[in-house]
Every structure is written in structure tokens, then in C-alpha cells.
Amino acid sequence: MTDESAMNFVVNGDLDKAAILYERYKRPLFNFYLRFGVERDLSQDLTQQVFYRLLHYRHTFREGYEFRTWIYRIARNIYHDHLKDNSLKNSQLTENLEIYEEENYDDEQYNLVQLALQKLPDEYREVLQLSRYEELKYEQISEVLNVSVSVVKVRVHRAIKKLREIYLSLDLVE
């Protein structure tokens, strides 16, 4: 069963099909928040909020929508709501440099890349995360962010350039 057909069942009142979507997306969404530097417990809470909103706003999902794009837009909105509600700044998030992932990584380069990602401006970190980690296509990212595909391409290019600069400066310090 595709994500879209499962969601169409949910839209039409078969809420049990939401469990299929939950199983498919709980880990990717959890990692989505971790990569933004959100602590593990809070990432779990935010992931739960995504599925709460999925049920609450299920009537806004339309046939023809791509489910993956739709759910990542919800996840992004929840992240931004959280930042707004708690007046958190990006710099506060980077103070906690413990990097968590579902898998165990103790590779120094990986940690440097994660630290460099945390130091990127939000608009750059967001496009890299969606394109590289979540493997969304530029067209999908443009829908999630509500910008043109060309803006996404420019942001990705600039983000990679900036990430390289930050990484190299961190690598020299180490």
C-alpha cells in the first residue's frame, strides 16, 4: 500500500491506516529533528506532534498530493512553531554538541560534519537536510518550503559551499 493510499483511507475515516504511516515515518521524522540539533526526548515529542497533526488536519490532504512532501511540511512547521514558542535560537541548539543518531557513530569526521551543519544558517541547513538526509527531490523541497525550485537549487549550492568553509575551519581547529 502506498503512503498516499494509506493517507486517503485515513482521510476517509479509517484511522487504523495511520499506524502504517507511523511505522514508516517515525524514525525518519525523529532523525529529522535530531539533525536540527533537537535533543532526543524533545525529538520524540515533536515526532508525536507530527502524527497528532496528521490526524487532526487529515482533511487537508488531497488526492494527488505526495504524502512525503505533505508530512515533511507538517514536521517543518512543528519545528518552527517550537522555536517560536520557546524563543530558542540556533546558537542555543548548538551548545549541546552531543550528536545523537539512531545508529552509533563515533567517527570524528561525522561529528565535525554534524557540528558544521549546526552552524549553518537555518535556510541552508534545512535544504541540505531535506535533500541529503531525507532524500527529497528539489521539486518536493520547493513544495515543503513554498519557494521555487531555482531558489532551492541556489540554497543547496550556497549551503554546500558554506558547509565546506565551516567544516574546514573546524577541522583546522581540531
Image: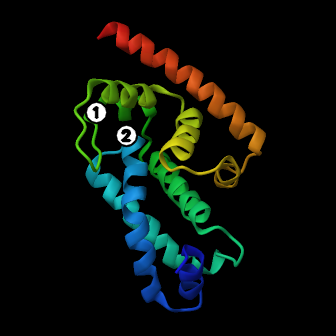
Instruction: Give me the residue at 77% from left, 39% from top.
Output: 150
Q: Is residue 2 above or below residue 12?
A: above
Report helix, strand or loop for mark 1.
loop
Q: Amino acid at mark 1?
A: Asn
Q: Which residue is mark 1?
A: 96
Q: Label 1 crowding class (10 Å Cα cut-off): few <14, some 14-19, many 20+?
A: few
Locate residue 158 relative to residue 30 in the image: left or right: right
Which disc number belongs to residue 37?
Answer: 2
> Above or below — where is 5 with respect to 68?
below
Q: Position of residue 26 (x, y in %)?
A: 38, 64
Residue 9 in the figure: left or right of residue 100: right
Amino acid type indicated by mark 2: Gly
The one nearer the camera, 168 or 92, is 168
Q: Position of residue 86 (x, y in %)?
A: 41, 46
Q: Secondary structure at mark 2?
A: loop
Extreme residue in the front direction: 1
**Whole-percent x and y of residue 162?**
56, 21
- On the rendered image, what quadrant is the C terminus found in? top left
Which tag, 1 or 2, sits closer to the chain's start? 2
**What crowding class fits label 2: few (fewer than 14 Cα within 10 Å), some (14-19), or many (20 or more)?**
many
Q: Residues at badges 1 and 2 in contact (C-beta under 8 Å)?
A: yes
- Nearest the viewer among 132 and 63 is 132
Gap between marks 1 and 2 measured at Cα: 8 Å
- In the image, residue 171 sits, relative to residue 20, either above or below, namely above
Residue positioned 69% across, 77% down in the render: 62
Residue 151 sits in quarter: top right
Q: Report x, y in % for residue 64.
A: 72, 74
